[in-house]
């Protein structure tokens, strides 16, 4: 999660919401990303999506098996859907997202029993640090 926090801080360089994600397989980072919506002018350029794309390229497959995704904020519905489609077996996130989270807060896409894949999900890892980074970003904007 510390690597995901470092990725999140990189989003601040282009004034994007500081969210970071890394995908780890067999102890090696195979994908990483931070929000790039502003710099890319792309609503889908979320940290998880970028990390998933890198991981898939590294593996040469859209199936990102035997991996863990660490992300600083509970995934949104789009990212949760991509995680399911990529078959990521485990997701660990930091802070809850009570306004848009899709791993149990608002929706539970990752735990939806009717979908063909359900990763193991753990929330709250370094939640305070993850939340502080986001709060510091949004405080002057409110």
Image: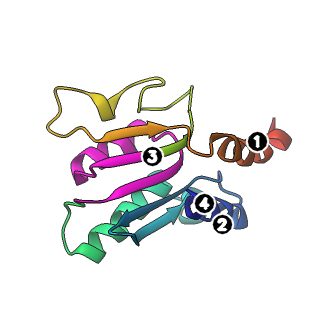
Residue at label 1?
A: 138
Q: Which residues are magenta?
A: 65-91
The residue mark sitting in front, 2 or 4, is 4
Farthest-out residue, right: 140
The answer to which of marks 4 and 3 sits earlier in the sequence is: 4
Residue 142 vs 42, above or below: the answer is above
The residue mark sitting in front, 1 or 4, is 4
Q: Is residue 82 visible?
A: yes
**Disc 2 to disc 4, how far (Cα)?**
13 Å
The answer to which of marks 1 and 2 sits earlier in the sequence is: 2
Marks 2 and 4 close (CB-CB < 8 Å)? no
Residue at label 4?
A: 2
On residue 10, which mark appears? 2
**Disc 1 to disc 3, how far (Cα)?**
23 Å
Secondary structure at numbered mark 4: helix
Other residues around mark 2 within 10 Å, as few (<14) / some (14–19) / many (≥20): many
């Amino acid at each position: 999660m510390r690597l995901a926090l470092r990725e999140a801080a990189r989003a601040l360089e282009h004034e994007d919401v500081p969210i970071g994600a890394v995908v780890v397989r067999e102890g090696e980072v195979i994908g990483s990303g931070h929000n790039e919506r502003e710099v890319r002018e792309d609503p889908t350029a979320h940290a998880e999506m970028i990390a998933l794309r890198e991981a898939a390229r590294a593996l040469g497959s859209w199936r990102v098996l035997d991996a863990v995704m660490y992300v600083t904020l509970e995934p949104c519905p789009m990212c949760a859907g991509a995680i399911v489609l990529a078959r990521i077996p485990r997701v660990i996130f930091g802070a809850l997202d009570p306004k848009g989270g899709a791993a149990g807060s608002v929706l539970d896409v990752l735990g939806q029993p009717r979908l063909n894949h359900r990763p193991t999900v753990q929330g709250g890892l370094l939640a305070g640090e993850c939340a502080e980074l986001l709060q510091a970003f949004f405080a002057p904007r409110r």
